[in-house]
Amino acid sequence: KQEVTQIPAALSVPEGENLVLNCSFTDSAIYNLQWFRQDPGKGLTSLLLIQSSQREQTSGRLNASLDKSSGRSTLYIAASQPGDSATYLCAVRLGTVNAGNMLTFGGGTRLMVKP
Amino acid sequence: DAGVIQSPRHEVTEMGQEVTLRCKPISGHNSLFWYRQTMMRGLELLIYFNNNVPIDDSGMPEDRFSAKMPNASFSTLKIQPSEPRDSAVYFCASSLMWGQDQYFGPGTRLLVL
């Protein structure tokens, strides 16, 4: 059974700092990996999706990397801003037919960026 | 597009009552997912549909939970009878096709007293 772990569970940084969020998964036979953002009381917003054949994806100040063989992904946030404060969730989709289109989520990292 | 629409946004009910949560996926999306989020267990997939057909319901906690998708634009998740431990935020998500981005609704916050 796929297990997804995110470290740290919570992170507080001053504005302007660059930071890295970590995600690890136990089954490397993934189809793709997705990073989401969740604001308090709200749904999830997709940030980046990395296919298993890719090493990284970039969107603005966000860069996500994937090392499938070691079962790890990182989300790098450059020049953090108070508006980046949210919970960041990592989710993996297995590559087998039986896994269908199911995502397995990590527990999330709760980020606070202080002005 | 308005995105994934869920109703109600909040529901407070008493133990034993029937609860029905509703979801309208993004038009044209052929996969629909129901998730439950709690502090203790995080985000868990309950069931997902592809082209209105339930594909995997192994995440449905017990027989008190049932889900239907009578057509491509509507799905329901029903809990009967509800229990306090069902209190959670229930999310619906849809995707255009297999393996693509999932778009989440705002969720229904359920409290069972």
Image (cartoon, rainbow, N blue to C red):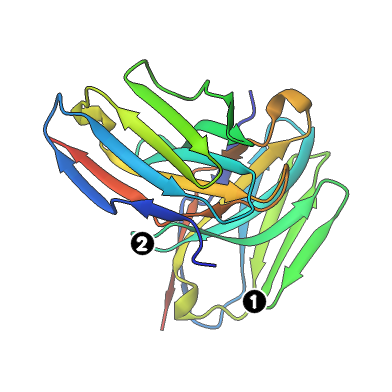
* In this view, B3 is above or below A59: above
* Residue A49 relative to residue A5: left or right: right
Q: CA distance from mark 2 to mark 1?
A: 22 Å
Mark nearer the N terminus (2 vs 1)? 2
Q: Quadrant of residue B63?
A: top left
The residue carrying mark 2 is: A40
Residue shown at 40%/21% (left/top)?
A: B61
* In this view, B91 is above or below A4: below
The residue carrying mark 1 is: A78
The N terminus of chain A, quarter of image: top right
* In this view, A71 is above or below B24: above
Chain ID for label 2?
A
Q: Residue furthest right?
A: A53
Q: Check disc 1: other Cα within 10 Å, few if <14, some if 14-19, many if 20+.
A: some
* Residue B107 relative to residue B11: left or right: right
Q: Quadrant of residue B18?
A: top left
Residue shown at 66%/52% (left/top)?
A: A34
Q: What's the amino acid at mark 2?
A: Pro
Q: What's the amino acid at mark 1?
A: Ala
Same chain for mark 2 and mark 1? The answer is yes
> In what element is the residue under mark 1?
loop
Can you give x and y, in whole percent of width and height, for residue B83 in the image? Answer: 20, 26
The C terminus of chain A, quarter of image: bottom left
